[in-house]
C-alpha cells in the first residue's frame, strides 16, 4: 500500500480528530476526575476526549484508502475562489475594527467595500448601491426597529 | 376532546393578537424568502434573528422563529421546481420530478399541487402536535436521569447514522460539538473548563456565534465568488389548476408522505431528509408506473412535500415535550427558548399552556398565510429568484456581524463568529458535516448533567442505563443504529464502490 493511494483529506481529517482528542485528554487529566459516583469536572471531558481520539484512529484506519474527490466549489484553486475565502473573513474583521471607533455606518460601508471585492461579477453601480442599502438596512432594523444603543456615526449621531 | 377545544381557544387568544399575527406573518414570509434563495437556509436565518428576539415576548419570538422553519419548507420547493436548485437539503428530492414538470410546461400545476401537499402534511403534523405531544409529555414525566441520558445519546447517534455519508465523520462532529458545549464554567464544581483564560468565553460559547459561523459564514466563504447566473426560465402560470386525474393520483400520496414525515419528525435524529427519501422511494415502489418517476410524476412531488412539512411540524414534539431536539434547526430553537428562560421538557405544556397552544394555533395561521403567499403570489417568488447572490452576501455578512455584536456589545463575539466560519469551512473541506456538531454543542450540558446524576443515583453502577427499561430501549436502539451504519459502510466498501461513488460518476 503506497502512500499515494491514501486520501490526503481523510488523513488530515483523522489526524485532526486524533489531535483534538489528545489535547482534550491532556487538559482533562489536569482537572479533578473524581469517581463515577462523584464525578469531578474532568471526568466527562476525559471520556469525550477518548472518544474523539478513537474516532480519529478509526477514520485513519477505515477511510483513508477511499479516494473521494472534493466538492467542485471547495477544490477550486482559482484566484477568485481564494479571494472569497480570504476576503469574506477580512470584511468581517474590518467591520469589527471599525464598529467602536467609527460607528455602525462606516463599519457597514467598510464591510461592503471589502466583501464586494470577493465577487468579481459585482458591477461598480451595484457595489455603490450595496454601500448605501446595507448601512441603511442595519440602521433601520437595529437602531430604529429594536432601539439598540449603537453609535451610528461617531461624532455625529 | 373538549379539553383540546378549550386549549385551542386559549391558544387562539394568544395567536390572534395583533403582535402575534405580525410576528407569525414576518416569520413565514422570511421563511419563504430564505427557502427560495439557494444558499441561505432557514438555520442561518433563525440564528441571525435570535439576537433580535431577545427584545420581544418569548411566545411571539418562538412563533416567528418557527414560522421561518416551516415557511422555509414551502419556499424551498419553489426554487426546486423552477430552477432545479434545492433551497434546503430535503428539497433536493422535489427537484427530481418538480423540475421535469416545469420543463413540460406544468410549472404552475407543480407549484399549486406542492402548496396543497405542503398544507396537507402540515395539517397532519399540527394535529399530532396538538394531540400526541401532551400524551408524550405525561409519559415523559416519569423519565429520570438515566432515561434522559439514553434518549439524548439516541438522538445524537440517530442524526449521525442517518444524515451524511460517513457515520464516523458524523459521530466525530458530535464529539467536537460535545466538547464545544463543555467550554465555560462547570456548574457543579465552578471550575473553568477549556476557556484558556479568555474572558470572552468564560460563560460558554454563544450559540449564535457557533450556529452563524458554521452555517452562515462558512457558506458565504465557499460561494461568494460563484456567479449564480441561473435565471428561471419563463414558465407560464396561467395553467395552475391540476386536472382531476392529477388530484386522484396526488391525494393518497400526500397521506402516505404525511405519515412518513410525522414518524421521522417525532423520532429524534431522523429528520426531514430521511422522511423525503423514504416517501419518494415508497411512492416509486408501489406505483403502477414507476418508469415515469424522474420525468415529472406528480406523486414524486406531492409525497416528499407532504413528508417534509409534516416533519417540520412534528419535530416540535420531542423538542417541546422532552427538551431533546431532533435536528440542528430544532436545536437552535431549543437554544432560543432557553435564552428566554424557558426550559422545554415534560412540564412545558402544563406550565406554559398559553405558549404551547399559542404556538399550535400560530402553525395553523402560518400555514394559511403560506398557501396565500404561494398560490396567488407566486410571481413575487420567481422574481426573487433573479437576485444575484453577489448582492445578497454582503448584506448577510453585515447582519451576522451586527446581530452577534448586539448580544453582549462585544467585538470579541464578531471574531468568534469569524473563527467558527473558518472552522466550518475547514470542516467542509474535510467533509465533516456541520449539523451533528451543532446538535452535540447544544445537548452537551444536558448530556453531562444527566450522566452525572444517573451515576450518582445508581452509586456508580453503569448497568443503570441498561436495567431501567425505557433507558435500556434507547440504548438498544442506539446500538442497532450503530450496527446498521457499520453494515452499510462495509457494504459500500466493496470493489469500486465507496461513499463518494455518486459524486464521482456524475
Image: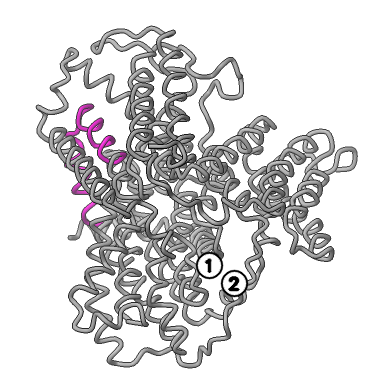
Residue B409 location, x and y as percent?
67, 33
Residue B406 location, x and y as percent?
65, 38
- Subunit bearing disc 1: B
Decide which of tag 1 and tag 2 comes sooner along the chain.
1
Question: Residue tagged by mark 1?
Answer: B36
Label 1 with label 2: CB-CB less than 8 Å: yes
Residue B137 is one of the magenta-drawn residues: yes
Mark 1 crowd level (few <14, some 14–19, many ≥20, 10 Å Cα)? many
Magenta residues, as a range?
B130-156
Label ID, residue B157: none
Question: Residue tagged by mark 2?
Answer: B385
Name the quarter where the C terminus of chain B is drawn. Answer: bottom left
**Relative side of B303 to A60, left or right:** left
Residue B411 location, x and y as percent?
69, 32
Residue A67 location, x and y as percent?
42, 47
Cα distance between the residues tagged 1 and 2: 7 Å
Amino acid at each position: 500500500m503506497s502512500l499515494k493511494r491514501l486520501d490526503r483529506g481523510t488523513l488530515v481529517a483523522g489526524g485532526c480528530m486524533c489531535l483534538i482528542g489528545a489535547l482534550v485528554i491532556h487538559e482533562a487529566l489536569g482537572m479533578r476526575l473524581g469517581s463515577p459516583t462523584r464525578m469531578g469536572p474532568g471526568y466527562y471531558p476525559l471520556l469525550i476526549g477518548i472518544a474523539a481520539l478513537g474516532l480519529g484512529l478509526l477514520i485513519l484506519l477505515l477511510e483513508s484508502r477511499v479516494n473521494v474527490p472534493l466538492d467542485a466549489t471547495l477544490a477550486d484553486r482559482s484566484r477568485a475562489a481564494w479571494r472569497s475565502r480570504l476576503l469574506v473573513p477580512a470584511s468581517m474583521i474590518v467591520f469589527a475594527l471599525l464598529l467602536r471607533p467609527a460607528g455602525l455606518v462606516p463599519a457597514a460601508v467598510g464591510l461592503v467595500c471589502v466583501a464586494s471585492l470577493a465577487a468579481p461579477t459585482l458591477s461598480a453601480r451595484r457595489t455603490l448601491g450595496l454601500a448605501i442599502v446595507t448601512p441603511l438596512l442595519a440602521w433601520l432594523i437595529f437602531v430604529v426597529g429594536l432601539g439598540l444603543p449603537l453609535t451610528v456615526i461617531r461624532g455625529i449621531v | 376532546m373538549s379539553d383540546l377545544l378549550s386549549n385551542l381557544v386559549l391558544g387562539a387568544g394568544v395567536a390572534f393578537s395583533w403582535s402575534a399575527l405580525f410576528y407569525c406573518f414576518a416569520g413565514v414570509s422570511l421563511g419563504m424568502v430564505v427557502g427560495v434563495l439557494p444558499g441561505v437556509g432557514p438555520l442561518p436565518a433563525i440564528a441571525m434573528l435570535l439576537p433580535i428576539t431577545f427584545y420581544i415576548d418569548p411566545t411571539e419570538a418562538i412563533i416567528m422563529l418557527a414560522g421561518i422553519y416551516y415557511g422555509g419548507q414551502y419556499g424551498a420547493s419553489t426554487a426546486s421546481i423552477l430552477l432545479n436548485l434545492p433551497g434546503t437539503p430535503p428539497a433536493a428530492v422535489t427537484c427530481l420530478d418538480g423540475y421535469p414538470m416545469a420543463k413540460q410546461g406544468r410549472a404552475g400545476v407543480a407549484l399549486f399541487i406542492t402548496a396543497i401537499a405542503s398544507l396537507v402534511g402540515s395539517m397532519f403534523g399540527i394535529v399530532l402536535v396538538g394531540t400526541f405531544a401532551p400524551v408524550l409529555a405525561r409519559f415523559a414525566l416519569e423519565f429520570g436521569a438515566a432515561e434522559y441520558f439514553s434518549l439524548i445519546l439516541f438522538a445524537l447517534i440517530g442524526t449521525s447514522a442517518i444524515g451524511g455519508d460517513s457515520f464516523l465523520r458524523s459521530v466525530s462532529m458530535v464529539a467536537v460539538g460535545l466538547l464545544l458545549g463543555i467550554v465555560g464554567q462547570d456548574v457543579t464544581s465552578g471550575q473553568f473548563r477549556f476557556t484558556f483564560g479568555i474572558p470572552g468565553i468564560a460563560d460558554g460559547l454563544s450559540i449564535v456565534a457557533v450556529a452563524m459561523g458554521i452555517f452562515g459564514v462558512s457558506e458565504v466563504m465557499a460561494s461568494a465568488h460563484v456567479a449564480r447566473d441561473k435565471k428561471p426560465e419563463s414558465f407560464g402560470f396561467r395553467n395552475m389548476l391540476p386536472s382531476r386525474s392529477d388530484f386522484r393520483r396526488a391525494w393518497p400520496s400526500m397521506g402516505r408522505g404525511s405519515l412518513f414525515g410525522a414518524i421521522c419528525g417525532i423520532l429524534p435524529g431522523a429528520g426531514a431528509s430521511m422522511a423525503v427519501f423514504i416517501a419518494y422511494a415508497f411512492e416509486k415502489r408501489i406505483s403502477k408506473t414507476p418508469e415515469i418517476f424522474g420525468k415529472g410524476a406528480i406523486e414524486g412531488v406531492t409525497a416528499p412535500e407532504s413528508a417534509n412539512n409534516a416533519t417540520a411540524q412534528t419535530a416540535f414534539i420531542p423538542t417541546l415535550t422532552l427538551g431533546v431536539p431532533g435536528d440542528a434547526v430544532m436545536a437552535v430553537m431549543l437554544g432560543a427558548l432557553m435564552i428566554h428562560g424557558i426550559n422545554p421538557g415534560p412540564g412545558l405544556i402544563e406550565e406554559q399552556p398559553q405558549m404551547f397552544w399559542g404556538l399550535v394555533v400560530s402553525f395553523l395561521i402560518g400555514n394559511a398565510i403560506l398557501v396565500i403567499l404561494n398560490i396567488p403570489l407566486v410571481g413575487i417568488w420567481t422574481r426573487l429568484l433573479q437576485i444575484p447572490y453577489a448582492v445578497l452576501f454582503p448584506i448577510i455578512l453585515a447582519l451576522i456581524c451586527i446581530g452577534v455584536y448586539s448580544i453582549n456589545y462585544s467585538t470579541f463575539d464578531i471574531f468568534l463568529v469569524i473563527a467558527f466560519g473558518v472552522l466550518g469551512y475547514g470542516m467542509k473541506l474535510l467533509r465533516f458535516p456541520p449539523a451533528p456538531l451543532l446538535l452535540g454543542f447544544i445537548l452537551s450540558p444536558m448530556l453531562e448533567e444527566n450522566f452525572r446524576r444517573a451515576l450518582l443515583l445508581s452509586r456508580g453502577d453503569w448497568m443503570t442505563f441498561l436495567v431501567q427499561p425505557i433507558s435500556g430501549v434507547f440504548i438498544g436502539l442506539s446500538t442497532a443504529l450503530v450496527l446498521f451504519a457499520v453494515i452499510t459502510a462495509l457494504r459500500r466498501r466493496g470493489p469500486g464502490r465507496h461513499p463518494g461513488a455518486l459524486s464521482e460518476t456524475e
